Amino acid sequence: VQLQASGGGLVQAGGSLRLSCLASGRTFSTNGWFRQAPGKEREFVAAMRVGTTRYADSVKGRFTISRDNAKNTVYLQMNSLKPEDTAVYYCAGRVSSGDMRNSGEYDYWGQGTLVTVSS
């Protein structure tokens, strides 16, 4: 099982990026995105399972998580980016139900992709 995140890069404040996470080997009941800024702990960004999505308050209204089942790929569309969104973004998958915001309950993780937002 492998998760491969891509799509990070350097963007100016107010710009947009779309992250992708390709899953190979299995599908997951829940897919999530987390991020870790320099010197900070990893934090929840967004997650989805059938019929439900969750977003961190800091990204609500700006980020959208989606999934293309045919491509086994999960996306994170990020609009109106701010310098405080700068972080390494990780995608994750889990097979269990429970709190989608809890990183400790995810079974598989991608390698991370760096997003840098300049002011």
Image (tube, rainbow, N blue to C red):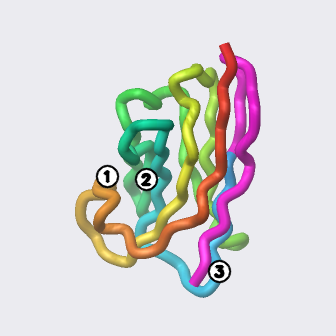
Q: Quadrant of residue 95?
A: bottom left
Q: Which percent across, then down, holds residue 90? A: 54, 55
- Measured Cα–Cα span from mark 3 to mark 2: 18 Å
Task: Determine whether the residue tagged by mark 3 lies in a helix, strand or loop.
Answer: strand
The secondary structure that dominates the magenta segment is strand
Residue extending farthest left? 98
Q: Residue at x 60, y 63 (%)?
A: 111
Sequence-wise, the earlier of marks 1 and 3 is 3
Q: Residues within 10 Å of mark 2 (few under 14, many from 20)?
A: many
Pointer 1 residue: 101
In this orientation, which residue lies closer to the viewer: 101 or 50?
101
Q: Is residue 5 visible?
A: yes
Task: Determine whether the residue tagged by mark 1 lies in a helix, strand or loop.
Answer: loop
Residue 104 colored in magenta in the image: no
Q: Residue at x 29, y 56 (%)?
A: 102
The disc labelled 1 sits on which kind of residue?
Answer: Arg
Looking at the rendered structure, which numbered label has been put on residue 1? none
Pointer 2 residue: 47
Disc count in the image? 3
Sequence-wise, the earlier of marks 3 and 2 is 3
- Measured Cα–Cα span from mark 1 to mark 3: 23 Å
Sequence-wise, the earlier of marks 2 and 1 is 2
Q: Residues within 10 Å of mark 1 (few under 14, many from 20)?
A: many
Asked if marks 2 and 1 touch (Cβ < 8 Å), the reply is yes
Q: Residues within 10 Å of mark 3 (few under 14, many from 20)?
A: few
The disc labelled 2 sits on which kind of residue?
Answer: Ala
Residue extending farthest front? 39
Q: Would residue 32 appear left or right of 26 to someone viewing this image?
A: left
**Above or below — where is 84 with respect to 113?**
above
Looking at the rendered structure, which numbered label has been put on residue 24? 3
Q: Which percent across, then down, holds residue 17? A: 71, 36
What segment is highlighted magenta in the picture? 1-18
